[in-house]
Amino acid sequence: MCGIFGYAGYRDAAPVLVEGLKKLEYRGYDSYGIATLDTHLDIHKKQGKISETEGSFPKLRGTLGISHTRWATHGVPNDVNAHPHTDCTHRIAVVHNGVIENYFELRKDLTAQGHTFLSETDTEVIAHLIESHYQDDLYTAVIEALRHLEGSYALLVLAENEHRIIAARNKSPLVLGIGDGEMFAASDVAPLLDYTERVIVMEDDDQAIITPQGIRVLRAGNAVDRPVERVTWHADEIKRGGFAHFMLKEIYEQPGVFFETFRAARDENTLAIIRDSPQVTAIACGSSFHAALLMKYFLEEYCRKPVRVEFASEFKYYTPPVSGVALAVSQSGETADTIAALRKAKQYNCPTVAVTNVQGSTISRAADKTIYMRAGPEMSVAATKSFIAQVAVFLQIANMLTDGKLNQALLHAHQAIEETLLVDLADAVALCKKAENLFYIGRGAFYPVAMEGALKMKEISYIHAEAYAAGELKHGPFALLTDITPVVAICPGGITRGVMISNIKEVKARKAPVIALGESQDTELRDIVDCFIPIRSKGPIPQVLSATVILQLLAYHTARELGCDLDMPRILAMSVTVE
Ligand code: M6R
């Protein structure tokens, strides 16, 4: 959560930082702030979104600066709690992504020493700690201050007398960008892409001294070598490109993303690890968890390979028996719970594989092997193309484990996504947007699809939506069905169709309106439901993909009709870097 961005170069820093922050806004957007350095520090910080400041940003002087977009952890979103935070003299400024776990004790000690705090944040202790160690060298003061900190941080620090930025990382991501006469530091590569494709990914416990002329990476005062990597993403990929929202753009990118990821995920070495494992344990959160549940269906159904799927946030707190490979699934590769669960899996000495979208991310560096999704940057907080990319990875694994038995089914999979993009959802949206509660039901692989559909709906439209395995509805949730509680039922062909029809009739008998996704020619289903959405593809795998896209679009159009902020839903953030 939170995005930080620093610039040291020859341009006016403030406009560079404003534009950069907009690209990091998906990480948090309740307030923003910038500090620039000329002869003295200029600071501007405010509650609200940086993207809504158009033209109203005050002039800040200097070609060196640091900036922040916030997702509040300590203290409500307001102007005072916005970063940067400063020391008592206002000559040291700090932006921070992470959580300082011992901030309370530190604050007590610093207050007793005479420091005055202005905000409720954990971050402010860092500025005062640096102040208390500062003599004439900012870097030395920062490393002294770091010794006192427990928790996670990616930090950028400025001090009035020094024309450089000090960066430090521990458990929160930080990349450095190398330009020509200008250098950058950011929570991820998105703000760097307009300027450079050369980056250094900082490791935990690294610090960096950043000047317009260059970057030195150090650890406790000693220089270290870190490789310069080339970023494969392009600046165009983080533009909306004519779409009203990133979410819609990313939904439309899915045919290509599926195709590319499926092709690129063919990795014999990693497959050998999975093939040799008696069991696969997947750890993930949110949408990635749902994608992992789909993998369970694919690998167990088609390959007879046992798969367990655990919430990363639960896995790290108990001691399950684990045998075989642990798969950490994460779009960002920076989700704190998944990182912690991956570290726990490593304690079992099991081989680990990361499935992630982000080159050089913490999860990819921590795992023994990485399978990269080819989704490109996902800018919308609601995951769409990254989910499809994860499914593509898992289908490739299933296909390789069965020596190509799924080839035929997969041949036109990306077309199943493409032909779904233009589905007419007007009637379904009309039903959903009036509802306060929605149920989603499905069976087999369509149950995780229902879970993902319900998550999309609730996170962007704020309508309460719950998914159930269709057979479970009558074991309690039935009590909640009314004539204003629509049920979205995924009812394609195959062995579950008959029993799904029975479940739908039971729902109808309670007068709840039913929106059904079914095969185009299923007239029996069409006749019994209130709203029918045709799935044109054939076979379970293409239908899983089609149904996923239909439910993404249903959530998108419902939220749009309700006037919700689609790319930045309230309170949420893309990359959940706190546990
Ligand atoms: O980056 P990750 O895949 O680890 O993120 C996990 C979840 O926070 C994420 O999937 C979240 O549920 C989605 N953004 C929801 O659309």
Image (tube, grey):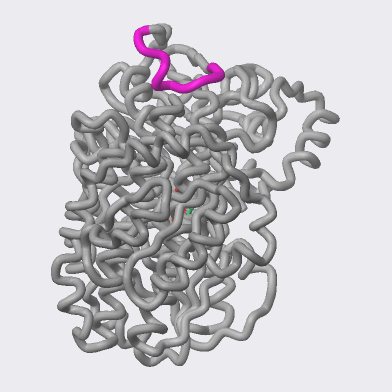
Q: Is residue 321 magenta?
A: no
Residue at image point 51% right, 37% down: 2
Along the line of sight, the residue nearer the viewer: 450 or 262: 450
* Position above or below: 325 against 192: below
Residue 411: quadrant of the picture: bottom left
Q: Is residue 50 magenta?
A: yes
Residue 223 visible, this angle: no
- Residue 61 location (% of width, % of height): 39, 11
Residue at image point 34% right, 69% down: 370
* Position above or below: 136 against 320: above
* Position above or below: 6 against 277: above
Residue at image point 19% right, 72% down: 410
Number of residue marks: 0
- Residue 503 location (% of width, % of height): 51, 65
Left or right of 183 on screen, residue 323: right
- Residue 331 location (% of width, % of height): 39, 56
Along the line of sight, the residue nearer the viewer: 25 or 15: 25
Residue at image point 32% right, 50% down: 533
Q: Write down the region rendered in magenta.
A: 46-55
